[in-house]
Amino acid sequence: MTQSTGGPAAKLRGGHQMPLLGFGTWQAEDQQAYDSVLHALRTGYRHIDTATGYGNEEQVGKAVADSGVPREDIFITTKLPPNNAGREEQTITDSLRKLGTDYVDLWLIHWPPNGQAAPETWKEFRRLRDAGLAREIGVSNYSTAQLDELISATGEAPAVNQIKWGPTLHDAPRLAEHNERSIVLEGYSPFKTTNLGHPTLADVAAAHGVTPDQVVLRWHVEHGVVVIPKSVTPERIERNYDIFGFSLSEAEVAAIDGLA
């Protein structure tokens, strides 16, 4: 774990810093997407996660431009829809135009195309990364076997694998498999997969004077797992960011791990 302008960060394969706390934009559309991303950036977030499939890249790009935050201080992720495999260059070119930037910090294959690892798509990702369109490349919703297929085909592992993650989905062997391959695990849907009313979370939250939501996000950070909570409510956007004033003990982390 290192530090970036967006707080604690993971160092990716290419040497770039990825803030462990990001801002998700799935299901945020039109003005709501613009407003929420702008508020997130003004709150202090420096990592924004979007995707071609979300249909909000233009709004994200406009919010970045209007935020007053230097582009180089913001880590932007977007994703290739699996049915766009074979049209990688056109897809990333369209994404960059909509985002109003010359590059993205991370570009992911959103799902395994046709359920397959798709090493040919991965080779195109490497080519377009080397051409300067993305600083880092990775995948989303890939199994360990599929990650190994990409490594075997090209000699290069993805920098990131973004998968559904949270306390009830905690899988220590799977996290270890990522760490062994120097692949950063990034979790999405941290709240949808969690019973925020669970007594364990309530007890830990009470001990620190925070909310169970904040405990869940802090738990990700303690594990070095990137997390991208999404909200369009200003108060929640701010609360989700306010997780750096406390830390969890080893016993608390273990208790939360036990929710799986």
Image: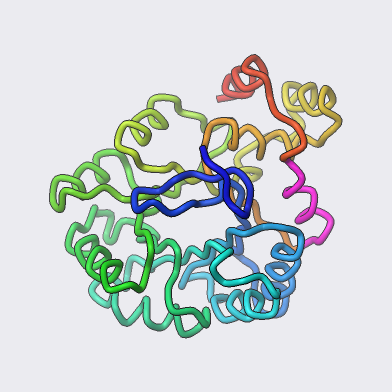
Which residue sits at x=30%, y=67%? 129
Q: Is residue 68 magenta?
A: no
From the top left corner, tell me how far across and down residue 133 is, in percent: 35, 73
- Decide if residue 242 is on the left or right side of residue 135: right
Q: Position of residue 196 (x, y in %)?
A: 73, 35
Nearest the eye: 183 or 202: 183
Which residue is at the far left? 153
Total labels drawn = 0
Residue for point 17% across, 63% down: 120
Front in this rendered view, residue 127 or 118: 127
- Answer whether residue 234 is magenta in the image: yes
Question: What residue is shown at x 19% (from left), y 63% (from top)?
Answer: 123
The magenta stretch spans which residues? 233-243
Q: Nearer the viewer, residue 130 or 225?
A: 130
Depth check: 6 or 94 in front?
A: 6
Residue 254, located in which quarter of the rendered image? Answer: top right
Residue located at (54% from left, 76% from top): 57
Residue 146: give x, y in percent of width and height.
Answer: 25, 45
